[in-house]
């Protein structure tokens, strides 16, 4: 009995499981320190924290879907265009009529699923690189939108604006919805066979195929979820802006930013490792960084440079830690 207990190795701290949490805590600490240094203590309130998170709802919803695509070692550069298309279709179909809310939402979700299905089929059946396939889809969507619309089109009824502006106390309904969606995505990845297959395919597609997993279906399913989340983000944005326009997704650079927060959250671009709560940590980190830059009065162009440096530094940090030899 003594020999067994002596040979039992102590449980090691696994960095990759806690990296996103450590980065989030570091970002919060830096946020507090900088606000104190700048004499902006008034921003250290719960209301301000909720407001910071509220500005990242579109990005957060989009990043949840992007996580699925990246976990299967794919990527989706069409999400910004899907957001624009969803917002335009939502506002045009509703056109101020509350009776059209449900049909419009159903049509937009169907559109999102169809776009994801086409992306997945092009990637798996035609074996087109995901970057090229989804970039091509983005250009097609953007071209169609720009042909028919060049500005805001349609409008959403007041009743629908509750999605963006309604709140439970100080917490917006849309923020609660984002975290509920994240919880659902986490459940799918953690407790369903489809979630297990996603990690298997992303980790080693050939091994997954030999194990009997239909890898093409998994990749297609991941892209359908990704586009569905982008469509939901577009619906939210239409509610927030009270209308839709063909450029609002691209203006927010949601395709690149959704990839950035997923990577900052610890999901590996090569696939097979990462998760939803890491992505949510990445969204919060990005929000805190933006808030710090705004309080400090950083120029918009300098802000882009600094954000790029932070993204590269975070990825390098993960890479350096993951390559350390085990003692």
Image (cartoon, rainbow, N blue to C red):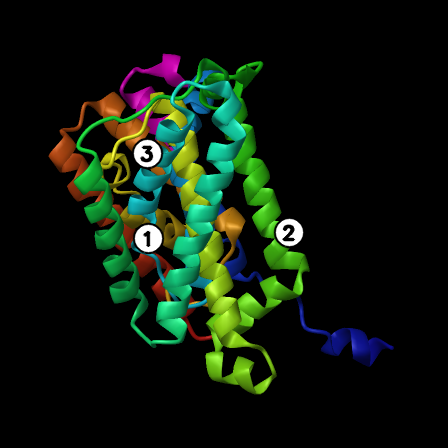
Q: Horizontal placement of 171 versus 6: left or right?
A: left
Counting every numbered tag in the picture gives 3
Residue 90 pos. (x, y %)? 40, 32
Q: Quadrant of the N terminus?
A: bottom right
**Dot placed on the residue nearer the N-terminal end, 3 or 2:** 3
Q: How busy is the neighbourhood of tag 2: few (under 14 within 10 Å), some, or many (20 plus)?
A: few
> Which of the two discs, 3 and 2, sits closer to the camera?
3
Residue 153 highlighted magenta (yes or no): no
Which mark, residue 92? Answer: none
**Residue designated by label 3:** 88
Which mark, residue 314? Answer: 1
**Residue designated by label 2:** 187
Q: Nearer the viewer, residue 248 or 262?
A: 248
| Residue 58 found in image quarter | top left
Instruction: Identify the residue at horizontal 32%, vertical 34% (top origin).
Output: 88
- Cα distance between the residues tagged 3 and 2: 31 Å
Q: Secondary structure at mark 1?
A: helix
Instruction: Identify the residue at horizontal 51%, vertical 62% (top origin).
Output: 221
- Cα distance between the residues tagged 2 and 1: 27 Å
């Amino acid at each position: 009995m003594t020999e067994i207990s002596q040979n039992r190795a102590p449980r090691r701290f696994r960095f990759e499981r806690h990296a996103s949490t450590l980065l989030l805590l570091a970002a919060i600490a830096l946020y507090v320190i900088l606000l104190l240094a700048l004499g902006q203590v008034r921003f250290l309130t719960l209301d301000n924290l909720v407001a910071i998170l509220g500005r990242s709802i579109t990005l957060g919803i989009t990043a949840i879907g992007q996580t699925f695509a990246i976990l299967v070692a794919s990527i989706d550069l069409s999400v910004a265009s899907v957001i624009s298309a969803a917002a335009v279709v939502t506002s045009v179909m509703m056109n101020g009529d509350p009776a059209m809310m449900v049909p419009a939402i159903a049509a937009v979700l169907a559109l999102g699923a169809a776009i994801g299905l086409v992306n997945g089929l092009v990637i798996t059946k035609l074996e087109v690189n995901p970057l090229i396939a989804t970039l091509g889809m983005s250009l097609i969507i953007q071209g169609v939108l720009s042909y028919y619309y060049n500005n805001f089109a349609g409008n959403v009824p007041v009743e629908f604006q509750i999605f963006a502006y309604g709140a439970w106390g100080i917490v917006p309904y849309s923020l609660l919805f984002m975290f509920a969606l994240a919880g659902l995505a986490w459940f799918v990845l953690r407790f369903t066979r489809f979630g297990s297959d996603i990690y298997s395919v992303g980790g080693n597609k050939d091994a997954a195929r030999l194990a009997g997993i239909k890898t093409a279906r998994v990749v297609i399913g991941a892209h359908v979820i990704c586009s569905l989340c982008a469509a939901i983000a577009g619906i939210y944005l239409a509610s927030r802006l009270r209308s839709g326009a063909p450029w609002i997704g691209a203006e927010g650079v949601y395709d690149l930013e959704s990839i950035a927060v997923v990577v900052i959250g610890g999901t590996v671009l090569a696939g097979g490792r990462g998760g939803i709560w890491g992505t949510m940590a990445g969204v919060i980190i990005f929000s805190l960084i933006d808030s710090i830059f705004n309080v400090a009065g950083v120029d918009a162009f300098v802000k882009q440079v600094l954000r790029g440096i932070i993204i590269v530094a975070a990825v390098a940090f993960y890479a350096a830690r993951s390559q350390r030899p085990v003692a």
